[in-house]
Image (cartoon, coloured by chain):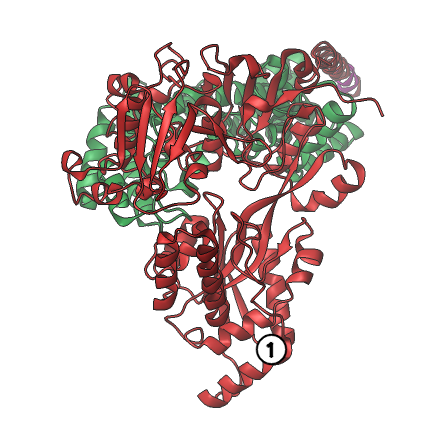
């Protein structure tokens, strides 16, 4: 197991370095620069600004300098938000996205798992059709439709919840539900599929034959294996959720990471693009690693293989 | 077996019951949370009491350093935190005493002597002195700082030469001098009629020298002095909190010389970029003011909430550029034909529907007392004739398709499609629409790699010069390849003219040249459409969308 962990960590380092390199050159090859604006900047001022941020150096030199700083943990200053370091901005916005993402995931699991289990256990009945139809609607209904709909009902009409902002705990309810319901739909469908597959296995029949109680069959034998597809999905889903959602942040005016992720590319904020991409990549790599361990714990066959 | 199966189903059923109970309790808990988290008074309701203005800022300001800031949103915040030599009348934007309680102007109108008030203070209690202004102007003009708006100070004598590194400061004799602690003398290169108005641009605001020195920010971008714990201003408000993409909060400053007449206790600026979100925030009582309104919502809001929506003139022109260096726009007839066949009235009334005014000249009407005669005519018949003449001369049967480039936006697309249809109908010309991401668009235009492209310009100050200067030969904003010696000479003459009527005549001639040679195609003058709560008082429409906050207050709506 130790060698497995070590090998996965060693694999992660070149992956991240490759991502940093590709992103660095892709951002630099995109047309336009961070200081382009409709108001023309005198050439000498542009030169001064570029020299201040080291953009006057040869590209490869810039790359080496960036990688050197990166290895020291320095993501550099933002080109758009002057006076702010990229790490500082990620440090401010990540907890927001983390809170929102975690709440959304909890909602997704609270709704998605029972709905999926019920649907699998009561296959081809109303208990299957109803949650699965709702799940299909949930998957098809984009968050930019669901978000304003929830605001319309709970904020504008019923005046129960704030429509936007990130200033008190009540601000968390609507965005978490919007994001959570979308993921709940996926979780429900994956749980149903996983459970149905598992319930067909011989060992389930054996468990039943040996007189295990239905609850025990479900919780002890079927659920663990039935949740494998959900667990696989949860890794990247969680990384996506906690690294912020541009749409949700825009609809609910939330100062999360998703906005930086998207606008950095539009602003040609090179260091911010690299910072957010690397941060997201590190999250994905770490969570995939965690999911591997979880799968190994859930599935003895996988454990043996590893 | 059958019996066993039915027992199994029963237990399954009980299991489902458990899940149902779980789901019901979860729903009950959620609803309880909803109930208890509800119905606190809104920001707008609380504001009558606490006098805090909630302001939709649009974009997050890039930087709160007045000498490095570059945006409207930065102006909106900085004008609360800092005050220049003069301030503005809230209705007319006429200069009024600011840090300077009075001033005198020399006969040749080139030397201004400002007498600073004794009770002007920085937020830490330091007096605001003439030396602070000298330091600030030297800082912005310092080429090592890389200020994008340093050219605003080029009206000062020798400022341009120092800024362009031609002469060091000690030898430059830049026209800024503190004769004593409370007297500042500014000498101009030429008489500049709009000079006092210019002083209200944030690039002319002072900075607190000890703070700049402490944070080593004299010639360095991105220092920490603009953070709330470090910022020292001299305006009616002081910086309390700044959370990026969330809120910028300012509170009334007790050290401000006119604190007794400042009625607001604070302002909260929210950088809400999504237009729909901003409107929702306004409707729910979260905001007093929005930065803009979605064009799709204007009709609805006009019908249902006429007391919320406001159409205010705005000093800006929407236009298309022609690339003069490539055919067919190297030929004046094509440029003229395209201009003559645009029905600007239809464009603003049927397509834009946001109160915009059609533009038949480039400078918006009544800009610093200048209103150009309408020069760009609408004459589709003549346009058709010009095209036929061109085709005959070039031996062509029909016009080759023309590319129209614009940056991705629903608004720009709408205008481009309307013009595409007009040109197809009147002239039979095929227009290919090409939309680009913003930075790609800017890069394409600056390289001259376009045929016809969208443009827009918002004046920096209320004078025709801020518009007409753009089309000088090789001006950074020109980007059309158009050059006219007479036009350049007229602007030079306007710069040195002492008689205002003579000066306006030069501008009139410039406009005539523009309409004669059509380097650009002006389409409409901007209008600032905004939502404003009726409780906001002391807020008047102004051409630059400047609203001195010390005159603003919040008062309960009168009962109808």
| Chain B visual colour | red
Q: Quadrant of residue B103?
A: top left
Which of the pair B522/B376 is nearer the observer?
A: B376
Residue A235 position (above or below residue B490): above
Query: Extreme right residue here?
Result: B560
Give the dominant element type of the magenta stretch: helix, strand or loop.
Answer: helix
Per the image, is A257 magenta? Answer: no
Query: Against A137, is B84 above or below?
Result: above
| Residue annotated with mark 1 | B427
Colour used to depict chain A in the structure image: green
Query: Label 1's element?
Result: helix
Relative to A253, A98 lies left or right: left
Bounds of the magenta segment: B5-10
Q: Is residue A284 visible?
A: no
Residue B36 in picture, x, y percent from top left: 72, 9
Could you tell whether B398 is left or right of B225 in the image? right
- Residue B226 drawn at (x, y percent): 37, 22
Quadrant housing the C terminus of chain B: top right
């Amino acid at each position: 197991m130790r060698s497995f962990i070590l090998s996965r960590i060693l694999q992660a380092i070149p992956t991240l370095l490759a991502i940093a390199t590709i992103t660095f050159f892709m951002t630099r090859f995109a047309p336009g620069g961070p200081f382009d604006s409709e108001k023309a900047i005198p050439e000498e001022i542009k030169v001064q600004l570029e020299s201040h941020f080291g953009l006057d150096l040869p590209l490869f030199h810039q790359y080496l300098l960036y990688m050197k700083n990166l290895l020291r943990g320095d993501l550099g200053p933002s080109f758009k938000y002057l006076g702010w370091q990229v790490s500082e901005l990620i440090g401010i916005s990540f907890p927001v996205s983390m809170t929102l993402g975690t709440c959304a995931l909890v909602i997704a699991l609270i709704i998605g798992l029972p709905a999926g289990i019920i649907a699998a256990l009561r296959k081809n009945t109303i208990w299957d059709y109803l949650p699965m139809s709702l799940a299909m609607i949930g998957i098809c209904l984009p968050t930019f439709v669901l978000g304003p709909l929830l605001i319309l009902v709970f904020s504008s009409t019923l005046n129960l919840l704030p429509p936007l902002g990130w200033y008190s705990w009540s601000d968390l309810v609507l965005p978490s539900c919007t994001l959570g319901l979308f993921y709940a739909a996926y979780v429900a469908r994956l749980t149903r599929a996983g459970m149905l597959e598992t319930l067909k296995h011989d060992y389930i029949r054996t468990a039943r034959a040996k007189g295990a109680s239905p609850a025990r069959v479900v919780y002890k034998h079927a659920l663990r294996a039935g949740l494998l597809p959900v667990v696989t999905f949860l890794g990247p889903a969680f990384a996506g959720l906690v690294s912020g959602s541009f749409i949700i942040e825009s609809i609910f005016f939330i100062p999360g990471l998703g906005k930086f992720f998207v606008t950095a590319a539009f602003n040609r904020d090179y260091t911010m693009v690299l910072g957010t991409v690397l941060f997201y990549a590190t999250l994905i790599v770490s969570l995939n690693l965690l999911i591997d361990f979880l799968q190994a714990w859930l599935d003895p066959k996988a454990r043996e293989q590893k | 077996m059958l019996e066993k199966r039915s027992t199994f189903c029963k237990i399954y059923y009980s299991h489902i019951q458990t899940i149902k109970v779980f789901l019901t309790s979860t729903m009950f808990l959620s609803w309880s949370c909803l109930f208890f988290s509800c119905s606190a008074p809104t920001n707008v309701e609380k504001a009558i009491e606490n006098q805090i203005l909630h302001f939709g800022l649009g974009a997050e300001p890039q930087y709160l350093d007045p000498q490095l800031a570059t945006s409207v949103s930065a102006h909106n915040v900085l004008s609360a935190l800092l005050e220049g030599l003069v301030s503005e009348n809230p209705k007319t934007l006429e200069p009024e005493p600011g840090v300077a309680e009075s001033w005198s102007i020399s006969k040749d109108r080139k030397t201004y002597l400002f007498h600073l008030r004794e009770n002007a203070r920085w937020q830490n209690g330091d007096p605001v002195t003439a030396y602070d202004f000298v330091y600030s102007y030297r800082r912005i003009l310092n080429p090592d700082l890389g200020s994008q708006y340093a050219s605003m100070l080029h009206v000062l004598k020798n400022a341009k030469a120092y800024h362009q590194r031609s002469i060091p400061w000690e030898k430059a004799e830049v026209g800024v001098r503190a004769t004593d602690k409370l007297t500042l003398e500014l000498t101009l290169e030429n008489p500049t009629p709009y000079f006092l108005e210019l002083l209200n641009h944030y690039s002319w605001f002072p900075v607190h020298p000890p703070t700049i020195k402490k944070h080593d920010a004299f010639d360095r971008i991105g220092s920490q002095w603009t953070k709330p714990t470090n910022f020292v201003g001299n305006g009616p408000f002081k910086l309390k909190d700044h959370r990026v993409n969330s809120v910028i909060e300012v509170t009334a400053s007790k050290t401000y010389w006119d604190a007794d007449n400042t009625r607001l206790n604070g302002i909260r600026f929210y950088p809400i970029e999504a237009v729909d979100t901003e409107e929702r925030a306004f409707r729910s009582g979260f905001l007093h003011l929005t930065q803009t309104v979605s064009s799709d919502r204007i009709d609805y809001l006009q019908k249902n909430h006429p007391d919320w929506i406001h159409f205010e003139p705005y000093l800006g022109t929407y236009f298309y550029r022609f690339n003069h260096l490539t055919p067919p726009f190297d030929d004046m007839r094509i440029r003229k034909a395209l201009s003559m066949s645009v029905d600007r009235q239809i464009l603003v009334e049927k397509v834009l529907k946001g109160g915009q005014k059609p533009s038949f000249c480039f400078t918006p009407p009544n800009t610093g007392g200048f209103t150009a005669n309408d020069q760009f005519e609408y004459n589709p018949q003549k346009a058709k004739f010009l095209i036929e003449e061109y085709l005959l001369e070039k031996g062509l049967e029909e016009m080759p398709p023309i590319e129209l480039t614009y940056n991705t936006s629903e608004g720009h697309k709408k205008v481009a499609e309307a013009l595409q249809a007009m040109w197809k109908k009147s002239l039979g010309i095929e227009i290919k629409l090409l939309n680009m991401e913003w930075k790609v668009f800017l890069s394409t235009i600056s390289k001259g790699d376009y045929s016809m492209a969208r443009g827009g310009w918002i004046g920096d100050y209320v004078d025709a010069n801020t518009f007409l200067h753009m089309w000088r030969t090789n001006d950074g904003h020109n980007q059309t390849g158009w050059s006219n010696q007479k036009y350049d000479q007229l602007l030079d003459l306007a710069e040195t003219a002492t008689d205002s009527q003579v000066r306006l005549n030069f501008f009139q001639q410039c406009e005539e040249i523009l309409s004669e040679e059509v380097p650009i195609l002006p389409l409409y003058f901007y209008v600032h459409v905004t939502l404003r709560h009726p409780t906001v008082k002391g807020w008047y429409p102004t051409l630059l969308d400047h609203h001195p906050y010390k005159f603003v207050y919040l008062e309960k709506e009168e009962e109808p």
